[in-house]
Image (cartoon, grey):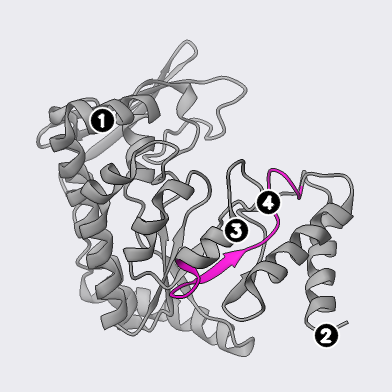
Amino acid sequence: RRMHKDVTVKTWKEGSLLYKQYDTPAGPLRAVVECNAYWTHGDDIPLGTDWTANFKKAWIEDEKDLECMKYLFIPWEPSPDEFKSLKENFTRIKNFADQYRLPVSTPGGMGLTLGLQLFLPEKLCLKVIENPAIVHEFLEMEHQCNRKVIELAGNFGVDIIQRNGFYETCDFYSPKMLEEFLEKRISDEVALTHQAGMKMMYTAHTGIMPMLDYLNRLNIDCIFGIDIAFPGVDLNKIKVKLFDKKSLFIGPSSTHHLWNPDPQVTRNAVRTVYETFGKRGIILGPCVSMHSIMPWENLLAMIDEWKIINGLS
């Protein structure tokens, strides 16, 4: 996305409160956060952050805020010089990836995940019921930017579009809501991705069991990050509903397995994945992440168990 050329930005502090304001042709757009030990962004307030509990004023509260936000979400049409620079950067990345026979991926949209960060979680969950029009308008704004990202990525020769659906699940919405707000837009983004010869990987972590039929209809190629140990998760049902059409980037749960002090717990999780799904169509990895505060032995155990199962050790 690109900001309008007439947009200016400023930040300031008043006591423990941090303010950031974009002055746009439609008026000021402001967010306010509590700057305490839990705030991880220093003297800045990003447009997208998971630290929503610190917000005292969300970026988007009403239609006026959304009109201002549109000046920050203009689909990017790179100038010839920008396109040349981007192409040079991509070529360096592609050459590096080719040395190791790796695909190149790029983020390609966040939808309601970004919406949750800009509206704030509780307020967005109410907006989809009380004011669905503003949610549709926000999603359409972001969708048009996503289309441009996909177009550029396809022109360069990117292999995978990463669509972030982390907060687009039944943790927050009913399956019918997901269909209403997302299905047509995501399907369009997938079609553009495939037209350019790329694959789409979609993040879905928790709250997915009620939405399996909806996920199955989306023509995405791979689902990343399903928490295999989350309460209510039925891996056999996931296999029946999704695995005939989609690959899975899946593995030990960040929350339930990779924190455990016993590496055998991680090994057992790896075995559960392969015993359920087999070896074809599976990419093994932490779901959804591995951090330095987790036991390093668990990452080594995951890799070692993968080697044993696949006859590499």
Q: Is residue 79 left or right of residue 117?
A: left
Q: Does residue 73 show up?
A: no
Q: Nearer the viewer, mark 2 or mark 3?
A: 3
Q: Residue furthest top?
A: 15
Kind of residue indicated by mark 4? Ser
| Element under disc 3 | helix
Instruction: Name which of mark 3 and mark 1 comes first in the sequence.
Output: 1
**Separation of marks 3 and 1 at Cα, in angstroms:** 37 Å
The spot of residue 178 in percent (x, y) is 30, 47
Q: Residues within 10 Å of mark 3 (few under 14, many from 20)?
A: some
Kind of residue indicated by mark 1? Ile
Along the line of sight, the residue nearer the viewer: 150 or 240: 240
Along the line of sight, the residue nearer the viewer: 174 or 80: 174
Q: Nearer the viewer, mark 3 or mark 1?
A: 3
Instruction: Name which of mark 4 and mark 2 comes first in the sequence.
Output: 4
Kind of residue indicated by mark 3? Leu
Image quadrant of residue 134? top left
Q: Nearer the viewer, mark 1 or mark 2?
A: 2
Query: Which residue is denoted by mark 3 in the rendering?
Result: 235
Q: Does residue 313 show up?
A: yes
Query: Which residue is denoted by mark 1 in the rendering?
Result: 60
Instruction: Name which of mark 4 and mark 1 comes first in the sequence.
Output: 1
Query: Which residue is denoted by mark 2 in the rendering?
Result: 311
